[in-house]
């Protein structure tokens, strides 16, 4: 297994970081999140031009055929910059769903556009309580001649209203619907940099995606999402750590930099220890997804067990170590705090992640 | 009719009902109507002889003892009085005026304060002076028989509607840090005073930045002695600690055990053994703090003042909130992070989660509280202090590059 | 409710502390624990002369009729000194069991001797896995003419081999057996200051104690034991805190006392905060046992939820803050560490305590 | 036959089987027979040309590179070699001799060390110098062409059977703390050297106190330069860090996830959701540390030396053990605290619980590790240091009253 990046991967990280440094400043993020759509389309285009959206999409469908390690490199940078783009929704959740569904027609129709960033897609897999897969209880599919129609609700759809296509997990398996055909109810969100919506389906026309084991697809997508989200969370941790250490060097209280106080220094050391271990976990999970996918379930669950709690704790500690300034709207600390809490609960709860890991370990 | 009876009767007749409640200054900004209601209530309190219970009769107070004050607190604890906007005026500035003010200052300021006609704010914190309260950089320079003040204050609650402020400014930068500070009374409507709302991470702006641009103060604006402002500030902060410790949390609190347990039942998560265990631990955290506070009060009644042990309550209270934030996530799950616009439960929980960092920062960070407990309660030796023997102007303060 | 001690209670604490200061030094404890019996009989006699053993026993049975507050005062001092006496076993567990059984003949026969310390007793309520009450599955009672006979095993009997009488919770309720009639298998223990044994019963003659609800007796005894043990744990916490703070003031490293370093100072502050809150919890539970016993279940469970974990964490942190010297056999830190871990698991596990509290709170 | 092949073949033929294992010095005291077996094995290793792989040929080493050393480590990692008693000799003292010794010292000491004929120990720690390693009070006074040493050392592993010790002593108490120290080679059999076993909280005594009562050392006992002992000590501790990081835990570990999970299954507690959650968290703790270590090795292979980042592993390893102690209690319940005398599972778990505090104290406390990470990895500013500019004799050291 390989836990460090090669030159090409490091170069990719640098490219994305540079791009985001230029085009995804804090000021820009704060501007985008006040818009209706809440996503940065010009930035999305630039990322797509870099080939970022198709990294894990097979070459036959217009992707780079690179893999999860590369995609995680991009996600870490996006997380660090809190980039308001539908990368997780479209380049991860939707692209992986299409790939896992293994329906040639759907893949040919959708994947090239997702890989190029021309179109975006979202997935709807949760009902009102947010449990992954519970949309199978809340969305009912019924045949209507050659068509199918979906009725019911799916909640917690990430970047739903801006998606061109939505893949819905309903009581009769997977369906594709036009994004425009869904009645979207945008949710109020804890995290202003990530849009979430509820989808109301009232006899919405849908295309059924034949698939021998819809639940297995769901599980495969969860595993990859767990790794991808963990990479984003790692980006949050690393950025918060860096900012906090910088601040601890500069901020003076009682005549000396606060980083010289053990209360601050030792807290920074703990953040560093958490971040370094988290990075090893993410790299390993990404490597496994690429090179040993049959073994992914444990590293994927592990990634969420480790990252969901540690990223929030890091964001909270970083804010604390900034003191009063960290509590202001003007400072970015709160954006990382809200993102980290959101990510912590996006794919389950810390308790459900642990339960899943225990099950997968055969405890 | 004894005092308690009198208080009880008056409150029963005059205390507003829940829906007329005025928020505390640190909570959110009151509307014009709320402010007016609060002032009317304070005036009525004064007319009833229940304002300034321990303050001198000469200046509009009642001249009674801490016992009567305590009785008032006990009787009032069942109500949600609209006195939040006066907390700083009555709890901090007023008592300091009583202690340190000249006869003229007290005659001028205390009666309108008690009648609810004037509101005060506290101008201590600065961008460069957070935990290090004495690191004040705002300068007051003598100019004939006036002082000219220039600088910036921050985290000032109530500055939007305050009439006066108690200002801590540096009058002698050649002296060591804790000397050379002076406390002033500032007319918040004076030229050069600019108040800007400071938006916090919850999105609301109960606090302000206050810019002081060559504000001219008369010589009699000095509260206490020139260059003796630090002891005045310490006195005022002492009043603050008592005032915080005495206040009761009455609002609906989505992070309270009881409410999270109820939510777990409603959401069908109360049967999950992990959730149950976390809820039990949260109850334990809440309960041990409440019992600690009750014990502190009993000790205080028995003649052992709480002193710096109040920092235990502050610290434990903050840690408890962080624990509750974790439990809330387990209980509310994905609904913690996204909810329908009309769902006030979602709004309330998110607000509570976003306000939690304040608990371990405002009023002295957790780190500062642990230092207080270590130094003052346990008597542990102090850290080497590098900022004690150096003239202030030679010190590094605030946020500066290497 | 009253959470502070009155003058008489404070005087009691001082008397016990003085007695232990004279007769229960670290050297003496270390001597006693190497003996076969492992308990300090002369000290036990002195404590009994002070009336300590009968504090919670009714006056009609020769006790002081004082109560749990007073008993907890004594227990805190015994915990602080790690006094190797059968106080918890006899003056708490056994005395409370006899009281709760409410059998006049048994009470008249046994309580006066337990209160005076003339005799000691123990209770056997656990089977092999240590669960409170599981001896009902492992000890079988059978009639033999006028007598009953017990067969099976009870484990985790505190101060069993030195007990004159043993109260056994068997499949047919409560029984009293002569201590000498039991085949004792002394356990190896983590804590050298507290003896625990396994009881083998092979048709041992026993006296049946009629009792309408044996399980309710068991629960009542658990509640009182939870409070009593918490008081002992509080004593451990307070002593460890005091010793650690003293050491932090005296020990110099890098030219200044270690207590001037935030890493040590802030840790001491946390120990203090935990100890003060723990004391409030214990005082409240003891007060409730005396004045509002119907409400005891919640405060009793709370006492173990708070104290079992916090006492061990305090003992571990205290040892840590002593550095290398704390790791030596010669220093007492390890005795508190072992006692605290033992107490943590004596009446259940931290998980079972939480589950019980949740249940009692009606979660 | 290439080096790896040669190592592999030799080990396959000569490495003892598990039941012949000799415990590490820090673990427990080896028996006479075990010690003899260890010496025999080391001699065989030397005869096979596999001892002192990177040491100079001139002094009995093999003169090879770190690459061959790494190959040996890799091949040996599958075995439980009885080289524990030589860890300090080979891992710390030997390399320092190679670096700093004179030709005479190296000729005298290195060959018998490599042949397993002589064992070394390290005489640094003192009762007053724990975390503060440089706070050494043991004095070495020049007396003609000899040195006379007086003082006490502590935590010396292997002193019972060591033939030589590397001693850090103060030669100039008028100099500041980190100056005025000198490193000496001490014959452990010399008059005035008394070794007393130091019983630790587990009840065993792998460590010792070493009393030095006017021990006379010849002039050529100085290792390195007089008064330059601190840099020698730093070099030796650097070797220690590498040596600790490289060692692998192979013993049965009752606090390991795998074993606690198996225990939970045996005891019927594996269905309890709280126990499952805690076990999963323990696995996560173990796994993230293991992956961090693996990543550190890959970075090292790629040319980025671990440096002070090894402190992360040390710190995380200690915290992991504390987590495991908690989980063990949940899993083993009351059997954690009392068990039948014959039950070796009970003994092993108790020993592990009692040994856990050492993990966060020995080899640098958690507090020291966090300081190292903060200072050296993150580059945070240092604390004010009060012990740098004062002659040692004026400093407060160790445990002293107020």
Image (tube, coloured by chain):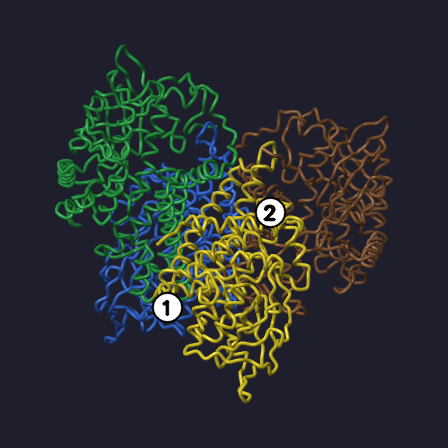
Chain colours: A yellow, B brown, C blue, D green
Up the image or down, C191 lies above or below A264; here it is below
For disc 1, the neighbor class at 10 Å (few under 14, some 14 to 19, many from 20) is few
Q: Can you give x and y, in whole percent of width and height, for residue D334 in the image?
A: 34, 59
Residue at image point 44% right, 76% down: A214
Q: Nearer the viewer, residue C215 or D376?
A: D376
Given the image, what chain letter belongs to the residue carrying mark 1?
A: D
Residue B290 appears in the rendering: no
Residue B171 appears in the rendering: yes
Q: Nearer the viewer, residue A222 or D395?
A: A222
Q: Can you give x and y, in whole percent of width and height, for residue C167 in the image?
A: 33, 64
Q: Residue furthest top?
A: D144
Viewport quadrant of the N terminus of chain D? top left
Query: CB atoms at circles 1 and 2 under 8 Å apart?
Result: no
Up the image or down, A117 lies above or below D28; here it is below
Judge left or right: residue B130 versus residue B182: left
Judge left or right: residue D273 versus residue D5: right
Label 2 residue SS: helix
Q: Which residue is mark 1?
A: D271
Quadrant in the picture for residue C292: bottom right
Residues tagged by mark 1 and mark 2 found on one chain of the structure: no
Quadrant in the picture for residue D105: top left
Up the image or down, C34 lies above or below D332; here it is above
> What's the CA distance linking mark 1 and mark 2?
47 Å
Q: Nearer the viewer, residue B143 or C102?
A: B143
Residue at image point 66% right, 44% down: B241
The circle on residue B299 is: 2
The circle on residue C293 is: none
């Amino acid at each position: 297994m390989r836990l460090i990046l090669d030159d090409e991967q490091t170069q990719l990280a640098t490219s994305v970081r540079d791009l985001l440094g230029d085009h995804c400043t804090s000021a820009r993020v704060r501007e985008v999140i006040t818009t209706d759509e809440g996503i940065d389309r010009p930035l999305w285009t630039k990322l797509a031009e870099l080939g970022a959206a198709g990294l894990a999409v097979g070459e036959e469908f217009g992707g780079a055929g690179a893999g999860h390690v590369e995609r995680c490199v991009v996600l870490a940078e996006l997380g660090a910059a809190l980039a308001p783009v539908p990368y997780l929704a479209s380049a991860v959740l939707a692209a992986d769903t299409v790939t896992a569904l293994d329906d040639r027609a759907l893949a040919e129709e959708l994947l090239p556009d997702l890989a190029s960033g021309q179109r975006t897609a979202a997935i709807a897999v949760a009902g009102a309580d947010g449990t992954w897969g519970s949309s199978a209880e809340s969305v009912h599919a019924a045949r209507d001649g050659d068509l199918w129609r979906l009725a019911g609700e799916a909640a917690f759809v990430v970047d739903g209203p801006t998606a061109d296509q939505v893949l819905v997990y309903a009581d009769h398996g997977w369906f594709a619907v036009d994004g425009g055909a869904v009645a979207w109810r945008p949710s109020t969100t804890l995290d202003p940099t990530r849009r979430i919506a509820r989808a109301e389906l009232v006899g919405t026309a849908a295309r059924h995606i034949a698939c021998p084991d819809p639940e297995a697809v769901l599980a495969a997508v969860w595993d990859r999402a767990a790794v991808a989200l963990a990479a984003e969370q790692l980006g949050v941790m690393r950025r918060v750590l860096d900012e906090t250490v910088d601040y601890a060097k500069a901020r003076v209280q009682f005549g000396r930099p606060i980083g010289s106080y053990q209360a601050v220094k030792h807290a920074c050391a703990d953040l560093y220890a958490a971040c370094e271990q988290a990075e090893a976990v993410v790299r390993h999970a990404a490597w496994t997804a690429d090179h040993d996918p049959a073994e992914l379930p444990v590293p994927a669950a592990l990634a969420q067990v480790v990252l969901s709690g540690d990223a929030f704790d890091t964001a909270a500690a970083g804010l604390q170590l900034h003191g009063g300034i960290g509590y202001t709207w003007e400072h970015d600390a709160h954006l990382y705090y809200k993102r980290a809490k959101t990510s912590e609960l996006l794919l389950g709860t810390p308790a459900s992640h642990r339960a899943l890991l225990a099950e997968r370990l055969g405890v | 009719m004894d005092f308690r009876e009198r208080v009880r009767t008056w409150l029963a007749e005059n205390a507003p009902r829940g829906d007329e409640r005025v928020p505390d200054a640190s909570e959110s900004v009151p509307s014009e109507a709320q402010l007016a209601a609060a002032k009317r209530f304070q005036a009525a309190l004064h007319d009833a002889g229940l304002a300034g219970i321990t303050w001198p009769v000469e200046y509009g107070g009642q001249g009674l003892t801490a016992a009567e004050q305590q009785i008032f607190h006990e009787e009032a604890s069942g109500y949600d009085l609209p006195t939040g906007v006066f907390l700083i005026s009555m709890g901090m500035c007023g008592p300091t005026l009583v202690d340190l003010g000249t006869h003229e200052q007290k005659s001028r300021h205390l009666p309108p304060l008690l009648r609810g006609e004037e509101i005060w704010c506290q101008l201590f914190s600065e961008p460069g002076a957070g935990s290090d309260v004495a690191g004040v950089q705002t300068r007051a320079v003598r100019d004939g028989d006036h002082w000219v003040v220039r600088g910036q204050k921050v985290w000032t609650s109530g500055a939007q509607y305050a009439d006066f402020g108690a200002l801590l400014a540096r009058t002698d930068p050649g002296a060591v840090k804790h000397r050379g500070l002076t406390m002033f009374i500032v007319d918040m409507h004076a030229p050069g005073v600019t108040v800007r709302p400071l938006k916090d991470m919850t999105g609301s702006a109960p606090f302000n930045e206050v810019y002081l641009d060559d504000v001219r103060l008369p010589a009699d604006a000095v509260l206490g002695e020139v260059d003796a402002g630090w002891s005045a500030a310490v006195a005022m902060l002492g009043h603050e600690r008592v005032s915080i410790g005495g206040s009761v949390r009455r609002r609906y609190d989505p992070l309270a055990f009881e409410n999270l347990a109820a939510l777990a039942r409603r959401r069908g998560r109360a049967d999950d053994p992990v959730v149950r265990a976390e809820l039990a631990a949260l109850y334990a955290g809440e309960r041990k703090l409440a019992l600690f506070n009750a014990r502190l009060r009993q000790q205080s009644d028995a003649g052992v003042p709480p002193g710096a042990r109040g920092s235990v309550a502050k610290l434990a209270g903050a840690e408890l909130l962080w624990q509750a934030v974790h439990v809330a996530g387990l209980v509310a799950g994905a609904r913690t992070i996204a909810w329908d616009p009309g769902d006030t439960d979602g709004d309330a929980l998110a607000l509570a989660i976003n306000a939690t960092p304040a608990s371990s920062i405002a009023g002295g960070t957790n780190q500062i509280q642990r230092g207080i407990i270590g130094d003052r309660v346990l008597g542990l030796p102090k850290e080497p202090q590098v900022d004690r023997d150096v003239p202030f102007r030679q010190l590094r303060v605030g946020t500066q590059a290497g």
